[in-house]
Image: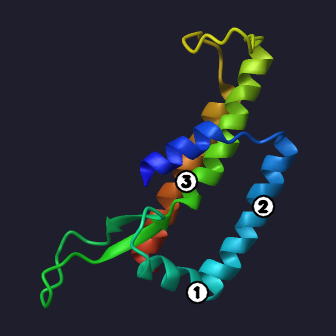
Amino acid sequence: GICFCLKGIEQFSLGSYKIGAILLVGLFFYDIFWVFGTEVMVTVAKSLDGPIKILFPRTLDPDPETGRLEMSLLGLGDIVIPGFFLGLLLRFDAHIAGVPCFPTDVNVAFPKPYFHSTLAGYVVGLATTLYVMIAFEAA
């Protein structure tokens, strides 16, 4: 699953900041309705056994009846879509710093204020999501 995320972020590029913002806002409302408003997405994600989700334990204590850990799931879209936006901001930081596009030197150092601040916000958002999923026993 993680390999699909990384490869998707590497291969896909958003055209502009405006498109990225529209995509994030649209998917925010999509998640509110389809994930939290109905059971459709959770039912589909739990019934499919493929690289579309990341499973993590809710607790470290196994269920006494089955001996299995209860698992929560996180859809790969919650990783990939913000990753597209992070990639756009990294390219924006490179553009502001005057890093030439061609020839590309992947080892060149440049300041990345937009990338780092957005990455920090994304990590806080994911941590909050995981906490809420465990606290409210969702998904």
Residue at coordinates 20% horizontally, 69% vertically from top-left? 60
> Which kind of residue does numbered mark 2 sit on?
Val
The residue nearer to you, when weighing 17 against 51, is 51
Percent x, y of residue 2: 43, 50
How many marks the image carries: the answer is 3
Q: Could you tell me which quadrant the N terminus lies in? A: bottom left
Q: In what element is the residue under mark 3?
A: helix
Q: How crowded is mark 1: few (under 14 residues within 10 Å), some or many (20 or more)?
A: few
Residue 24 visible in the snapshot: yes
Looking at marks 2 and 3 on the same chain, the residue that comes earlier in the sequence is marked by: 2
Per the model, the C-alpha gap separating discs 1 and 2 is 21 Å
Is tag 3's residue or tag 1's residue first in the polypeptide sequence? 1
Q: Check disc 1 and report its element: helix, strand or loop.
A: helix
Q: What residue type is labelled 3?
A: Ile
Q: Is residue 6 above or below residue 129?
A: above
Name the residue: 75% across, 71% down.
29
Determine which residue is flagged by label 1.
Answer: 40
Residue drawn at (63%, 39%) of the image: 11
Of labels 2 and 3, the one closer to you: 3
Q: Quadrant of the rendered structure where residue 109 is? A: top right
Res 137 seen here: no
Q: Given this view, does label 1 or label 2 mark the residue nearer the observer?
A: 1
- Say the numbered circle drawn on residue 79: 3
Of the numbered discs 1 and 2, the one sitting upstream in the chain is: 2
- Residue 25 is marked as 2
